[in-house]
Image (spheres, helix red, strand yellow):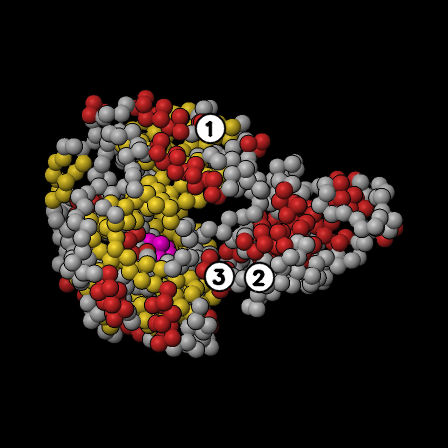
Amino acid sequence: MKRKKRLVSGRSVVIPMLSLAMLQPAMYVGAESGNTVFMQTQKVSAVQEEVIPANPENAKVTKEEAIEKIRSLFPMLKDAQVSEVELGDSHVYPPPANQMVWNIEWHYQRGNSGYGFNSRVDAMTGDLISTYIGFPIDEEDVAYYPPKVSREEAVKKAEAFIKKAAPYITNLKEKPVTYFTNQPLFGQVRHSFQFERTVQGIPVPEESIYMTVDGEGRVIEFNRQASIGEYPSATPTITAEEALKKYQDQLELTLHYIPLYRGGENTVFLGWKPAVPYSVIDAMGGEFLSPTGQPMSKDSVVYEEIPKSMNAFKPNPSGKQLTADEAAAIVEKVGKIPEGRKLQAKSLGSYRGEQGQSVWNLTYRDSTQRAFGPESETFAAIDAKTGQILEFEENRFGYPTSEVEGEKPNKEEVKKKAIELIQQLYPNAADDLKLINTDSMMYYPPMENTVSFGFQRFYNGIPVEGDTVNLTLNAKGQLVRLYTNQTTDLAGKVKGLSAKVSKEEATKRYLKDTSVQLNFLRIGEPWSPEGNANSDIKLVYQQTFKDGLHGGFAIDAIDGKWKSGWDPSGDAEHQGVEPKDIKGHWAETSLQTLIRYQIIKPDEKGNVNPDHAITRGEWLDMMVKAVDPYYDQVYIDPQAGELFDDVKKDHAYYPAARWARERDWIDAKEKKLGLDQVLTRENLAVSLTHIVKYDKLAKFMGAEEVGFADASQIKAKGAVSIITRLGLMKGVDGKFNPSSQVTKAQAATVLMGLVELQGKTDSPIGQIRY
């Protein structure tokens, strides 16, 4: 492939500061994600290699052959139309080195709904790179529970598919999928797989294949990560035992406040995590490496204190809410607004869903420019009460630029301005923030004409995971990007938190569940404008975790268990205890299924208590979890009005009740739910009619006589008639027993009966009714 050299403009991808664990370089997500954030301020070379658009004449696989390959692999695409085909990949930055790839855009029309998705095929080998079937498959073809194809059968189908789709990719090994694997019991069955490639017998995590096979055995998703480069020798000079000892000797845990994102009002837990991510060891030299490939030592300075300044942040003195124009004046004093852009949009709202915070969202545009594009608008978010700038983007959809093309900043001078500016922008910055050592790790991609800095928030001398301020200045010291992430009401959320698990105890647990493994890994600056050309593949020992864990987890300093701020799959309640009291029980199969899907769980002693009566709230919680395992992750606005008289927002089952109300499982007129009352058989029948969307029919049938000897005791005759005809509930000795209590075992069997009824009702269970 031909390449030419050109001067770079200092531009880089824009990456907002979301979950730190997710946004660090992929090779360090398994390290200590979210522990700290480091900024790269080294200026890049003024010369880069530009990839010339690929020439179709050089392709060994034609456009038509690539399209036909996709259709042959995915028969469900027989009615899909190709809307666009491109050789090369202009959709990512920096562009990948291998531009000999056919990018195929598909369009699928179903009634009034249109669906678009992408496929990629290697133009030299014909190997499939990626496809995701992004349209709903016809209901009659959907495999509900139990699936026609088991997981064991699905993995064989996945392996056979790989041989047809990507025969050039060999030496693959299936790995357990541990991220957010709790799929719903209702809906299409999907089996997810990860296959990791090995080179010279050494794993290459970056070249994994991710696949999804549905319950019918059809592949509906295929994606492989492919690195291009030369692999070094697979023979290390450092043994595994030596690497493990280095890892164990260097490990030093420190306390962190970690926000817990579980829906509603976010809380914070205190956790033990490594102070510095020593997770990658050079297998040839034995040094710990940063993502940029620089040697790291235990004595590396991670944080720098911020000296106090006379020019500190001054909150709005009036105590009144700022107007939009007043907020704009604050922004324009420090932010770079490109010439010609005027304030054209202003709205008052919240900032990323945070409660109790009114924020002005301001947008500057040039009316002569296009409405959307890389350099179309400037955006700012300002706290309407205090006047603190929370976010600023010189080019909201593009890259921060220098005032003069080619102008290069003096890093030390700009650093002084950054430290001075952060104190003007952030309350109590000198006390609450520390400058992150920019030479330790790369976070943002390097830029030639701008410099980025990161500041970590501390409270009581303890870092707050994810609470960072990231700012970028141009060569003149002007602010071109600011992104603030700060947990609100931190003092209240950490009140009373103190470590009950010692550092020694936590370290023992950490070392028990982690180790190192020999891998090939790309080290360098793959996010820089040069892309992979500025990185190398090295043989390293990389930190590994036991199944179900990853670098986003910490040791809870209260109970000593693993916990993640953003991934609930490893929470204590999800780690499971082997059930002891359901062996041989008449409902064992149903109960085991619900345990496997994390709908119910044994207590600390392993008891499920299958014959205990359950409450209305417990039944509702079971049903909602079966349809949406992550229903409680949705933000609940505490300022919103009350939905119920007897279920407040702090009630354990409020999230389930709100979710159920949105789907008409609960009548909008119902204000008293009685979730703490014991569930009766008649309650259960009424609930089921709402769930299967036959509640209107139940009212119509209400006058119909039901065939039970105790019919006179049944108030909801229509509901009982429908549910018994559907086979979800039955009578006993000719009686329905409407007031009898429902046990956990009985509820489990009814729920599983409802699962097997999927696809036979008029509306999918759990669908919102409009």
The quadrant of the rendering that contains the C terminus is: top right
Residue 633 in the image: x percent, y percent? 50, 56
What residue is shown at x 41% (from left), y 50% (from top)? 177
Local packing at callout 3 (Cα closer than 10 Å; few below 14, some 14-19, many 20+) is: some
The front one of 325 and 690 is 690
Q: Is residue 20 magenta?
A: yes
Residues tagged 2 and 3 counted as in contact (Cβ below 8 A): no
Looking at the image, the residue that sits furthest to the front is 584
Q: Which residues are magenta?
A: 18-23
Horizontal side, residue 555 vs residue 677: left or right: left
Q: Real-space Cα distance between discs 3 and 1?
A: 38 Å
Amino acid type of the residue tagged 3 in the rendering: Gln
Residue annotated with mark 3: 575
Horizontal side, residue 252 vs residue 76: left or right: left
Residue annotated with mark 2: 579
Mark 3 and mark 1 lie on one chain; the one further toward the N terminus is 1
Amino acid type of the residue tagged 2 in the rendering: Pro
The front one of 74 and 696 is 74
Residue 695 in the image: x percent, y percent? 72, 43
